[in-house]
Image (cartoon, rainbow, N blue to C red):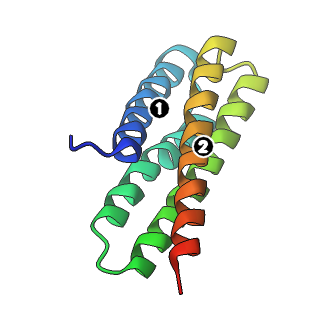
Amino acid sequence: MENNVLRSKSYQFALEVIQVYKNLNERKNEYVLSKQLLRAGTSIGANVEEAIGGHTTKDFVCKIAIAYKEAREANYWIRLLKDSDYLDAATALRLEDLSMELIRIMAKIQITVKNQQP
């Protein structure tokens, strides 16, 4: 993968989310909340990829904004799964930290691009 921190981190986050989803399905028989986490958590990287391939700055910003919202949603599902005792504290903390890192990166990108606009 090329040297793009957001691209790499969002991809790694998606892989972690997939493993958590599989574990929750197989070991805890939890299908609803974990599916929501799977959708939001994998959508982040997909939208980052679309942003990278965007044809205009407006297109880039729009896709980054969507990825940012998906990261916030994933963070919500992680907290909900933790507080409902589906996720152990260590796994939840790791995923929360990763999602918050993505959120911070994308927030900074949005601010930077907005400040560069005439």
What amino acid does circle 2 point to?
Ala
| SS category of the residue bearing label 2 | helix
Which tag, 2 or 1, sits closer to the chain's start?
Answer: 1
**Outermost residue toward the left in this view:** 1
Foreground residue among 103 and 42: 103
x, y percent for residue 50: 33, 64
Kindly check if marks 2 and 1 are in contact, taking CB atoms under 8 A apart as contact.
yes
| SS category of the residue bearing label 1 | helix
Foreground residue among 57 and 22: 57
- Quarter of the image for residue 100 reads top right
**Label 2: how many Cα within 10 Å (few below 14, some 14–19, many 20+):** many
Which residue was labeled with disc 2?
Answer: 74
**Label 1: how many Cα within 10 Å (few below 14, some 14–19, many 20+):** many
Foreground residue among 73 and 31: 73
x, y percent for residue 81: 69, 29
What amino acid does circle 1 point to?
Val
Q: Residue at x 41, y 59 (%)?
A: 47
Which residue was labeled with disc 1?
Answer: 17
Foreground residue among 70 and 56: 56
